[in-house]
Amino acid sequence: MSDFEPRITAFVCNWCTYTGADLAGTSRLHMASNVRIIRLPCTGRIDPLFIVKAFERGADGVIVSGCHPADCHYTSGNYHARRRFAVFHDIMEFIGVDPRRMTFSWVSASEGAKWRDVVDEAVTNVRALGSFEAYRALAPVEDRKA
Amino acid sequence: MTETATDVKEMREIARALLAEGDVRVIIGWEAARRGARPVFVTDPAEADRLIFDARCVHNLVTYLNPRRDHVAELGKIGLIVKGCDVKAVAGLLREAQLTRDDVVLIGVRCGGVLEENEMPAAVTLTRDNVAPRCYGCDNREPTLFDHLVGEPQPEPPRPAQTIDERIAALEDRPLEERWAFWTEQFSKCVRCYACRQVCPLCVCERCVADKTRPRWIEPSPHARGNLSWNVTRALHLAGRCVGCGECERFCPVGIPLSLMNGKLQQIVAERYGYTVGDDPEQAAPIGDYRLDDEQEFIK
Amino acid sequence: MSDGRFFISESDLRALAADLLGAGTEVIAPVAVDACASPAAMASSACMRPGMEPEDLEYRALTDASQLDLGRGLPILSLKGYFLPEHEALCRWKQKGTTIEIKAVPTEFAPRVVLAAKPCDSAALAVVDEVMNWDYQDDLWNGRRAATTIINLACPVIDESCFCTAVGAAPDATTGADGLLMPVKDGYVLEATTEKGRALVEAHKARLAGSVPAETLGRQAADERSAASARVAGNLEIDAGSVRDWIDTHFEDPLLASLAIRCNGCGACSSVCPTCHCFDIVDEEEGVGRGTRRRCWDTCQSPTFTLHASGHNPRDDQNARYRQRINHKFAIYPLRFGEVLCTGCGRCTRVCHAGQDLVEILQAIDIAARRPDEAEAARRARTGDLVNIYQPQLATVTEVIDETSDTRTLRLEFQDEAVRESFTFKAGQFGEYSVFGAGESTFCIASPPTRAGFIECSFKAVGKVTAALREVNVGDIVGFRGPYGNSFPVDDWKGKDIVFVAGGIGLAPVRCVIWNVLDRRDEFGDVTIVYGARSVEDLVYKRELEEWASRDDVRIVTTVDPGGETKDWTGEVGYVTPVVEKTAPAAANAVAVLCGPPIVVKLTLPVLDKLGFADEAIFTTLENRMKCGLGKCGRCNIGPVYVCKDGPVFTAAQMKALPAEF
């Protein structure tokens, strides 16, 4: 299916990655356009349920990104997120969700280029994996378009 | 495990005395019933002889200490009979300030393992085919949190035909797609009765996230998609807190192998954070805690 | 044999199943599974212990006749899920801008066959047929029932937890089914008991034989049947009528609490039960502007089953919830529909790992009861077109009024002209209003039936759906189902004086009646209104309060709680109850309509009594948590009374006769 374009939802923290993504934009870096960003105050706010919901609602892949350890605007939010998402990542892999559908990264406010790399890599990986329609199809839905 | 006359006699004596002196208003333990052992609530000292203890006493009675269980709390101060593994659940509640130590009298009983199913008319000897897989590797045969301790020291339970870790390893040996097929098939069986949640001694939230409607995070319908959301959420909320009592799997009416999920969670926190759930209320739980050098190999 | 019974060997029975499958007919039957193994995955080694055989049964759609298990064991889940699925779409919607398109779901289903069903499971279907067909007919259920031919396999009795004969079923019964297979030497005797059963037999005559002597067969079968019945009767014998009556009259008895003590509220019993049918209705968004409204299995054992929007929960501990289970199955349903809501399959006992044992519980109640009585059974003939009773009408919001900071009134007009012209209702009835994606919520119809072409509702934004309703604007579309419930007997009040007493948002249902009366003013005597709220700001329908005050054929007294008055407030200051006492409306030839927060109702009833109002002359409307509005989902009952059908309007006399569960 050469015309499949994955839909990626990114949950990013306001202080680092969002700003970094903005920097990527103002620097006019070229990158894949499949990502929709949802801004949160901190990765510590991100509940794994957000990711589950994203898959339920049509995301083929997700990105979770925030400040580097020691740089969290709220001091320790990303440390909590790190543990939480380590468990989440491992459990999802155990259940059979390909870990390449979930990208986790630390992207600081000055790392516009890194954001571009993260996005491009995520999009490439998810494009290769194909649509995650299998997830949505776990519930019977009529008239779905792939 | 052998049932010796001393185990039970001493237990009954202590229960009788506690009730007679008014130290507790109800003793929660096990009794023999038509279908095997089951929980019993003794309020009259004369009924203390109903209490039993043998390999059929599988139930983790700590679930009755759940602060939301009004109809039990109303009975008054509880005297709870606990095995060593059950004590870990008490420690969990104490750790999370869901229980005050003085509010419960713990009668610890030394244990040599329990059956996988309690529904037998009489106690039987444990074998590799009937022993509860969760008993393997137990280091709590003698409870460490108690007000009274009864029973003779018991030998190690037999190794089960297949341990939980072996079953998890077998599953992890399979390719990703087969694991997905396996788990989605299991989750499609779920009918969202929430037995797993209701019986879990550590599921104590006043308002469970599954009942939240604004917003509705977890789809309530029991299709595989909603069930995946529920089961994964429950697993994550129990990471580092689950004591491995296996009640969730035992209560599940459709036979979802939750012990595999819980076992995997325990492996994750052990491998990543060196944590094993124990009976010390002072020990910090892994989720909610952090180290500056936590593993982050999965993060770019 | 020519007496309608045929012999069939096991291989021929499998061949019959293969014939059906070959013709494309779905065949559902018990299949042996490992509870843990997945046929789709290789991970069976993860769960099955080495050397063990699959030991559980499930009803499954066969893919091959060899899967058919004839060992006569009990499948984990009953047949219920094939008629009331664990989750089922009621309708689907697509929204673009302000246009909503609803897609209906089919109520006709392809013919299918169940083979080797457990008699207790089929009998359960006949029991649930009652609730699915009283008044409104549930054609999602009926369509599946009509499409299915069920052949039972006589049961040898599973264990000491079976008690089918104690509740009117039997190990060889055919209630709810279309035929019976009775094991005999070398095969089975097949007997069809309905038209559908006979049609199946006729279509597969080639597989049936009659060459074994009828005499031997008859004796074999009869011996086993009576042995099985005796075995299960030995497990439990009760007088279901006495049990029903005892439960009905011993609501507060400590015996019921003591029997419930070890229950965790896990709901496993409800999920495996063949007769439990309570369900929830939820909206699930599945994309932007698109989703499905589904019903899904629910259980009265869930802590939030009866939780009100206000936070009050009439059944807020496990004792009350477990009592409801026993009450519903053995008293309420029999009183209502003439059938025990249980067929004695014993699954609830087997699946309860906390040790709740229904045989033990029923035994204890039977011993306490021992009172003879008789049950009545009533069936209604099916009439009318097949229609999905859960599908809402679409209505456009034509007016939005913010009554207070948290209370709003919406005026709605139905999109469909035919509905707009023909819609009628009576004062006091309610409906299910919905915002697609948020769900449905229950409110009274706040506008009077004397004004056609529109309906109004008033609500406080306290939950998910009301919050969504608070966001709708003029021109938006909402859903509506109704009118449901009974009504105020306004016609009986002709010539009488009417006293309206309301508190807070309780004025909404009363307002409907007030306007109904005022629109027919000369049919009634004096009209007195006493209305109070916490503060001036909290008074609802402010414009109408002024309008009523300006009329000289209405006496209205408005009051606010002490502290709630403003500087220019000219009304009363005081709680509603003392103001009613002070207003002292005459009780002779008068009726009272009372609605408000529970505390206001509780305190005002004695005042009205003191003023001389008889309990039969005081009318109120109860607001239990309701979901379907049609007497099916099992949520709103108080004792044997369904608030959505016997209410929501009750007299004080009727209310006092109800158990204290509201």
Image (cartoon, grey):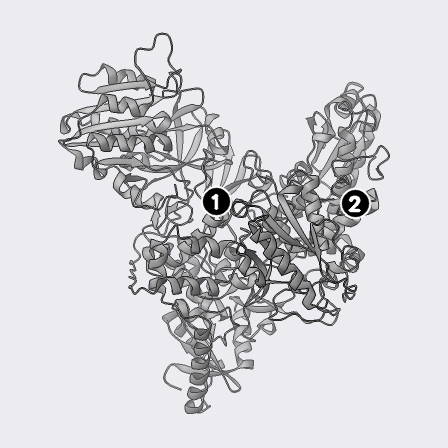
Q: Residues within 10 Å of mark 2 (few under 14, many from 20)?
A: many
Which quarter shows the N terminus of chain A? top right
The total number of labels drawn is: 2
B149, above or below A68, in the image:
below
* Mark 2 and mark 1 residues within 8 Å of each other at the beta carbon: no
Q: Which residue is mark 2?
A: B269
Output the chain of dot 1: C
Element assignment for label 1: loop
In front: A28, or C79? C79
Q: Visible in this render: residue C173?
A: yes
Q: Say few, some or many: other residues with alpha carbon within 10 Å of mark 1 (under 14 / 14 to 19 / 20 or more).
A: many
* Vertical arrangement, residue B75 with respect to residue C125, above or below: above
Residue B264 is left or right of residue C345, and the answer is right
Q: Nearer the viewer, residue C366 or C289?
A: C366
Q: Chain of mark 2?
A: B
Q: Secondary structure at mark 2?
A: helix
The residue wearing badge 1 is C305
Q: Which amino acid does the dot numbered 1 rest on? A: Phe
In this view, the residue in front, C133 or C571, is C571
Q: Position of residue C274 (x, y in %)?
A: 47, 61
Mark 2–mark 1 distance (CA, rounded to whole Å): 35 Å
Residue drawn where x is 51% and y is 47% of the image? B71
Q: Residue at x 56, y 58 (%)?
A: B40
State which quarter of the image contains the C terminus of chain A. Answer: top right
- Mark linked to residue B119: none
Identify the image quadrant of residue B81: bottom right
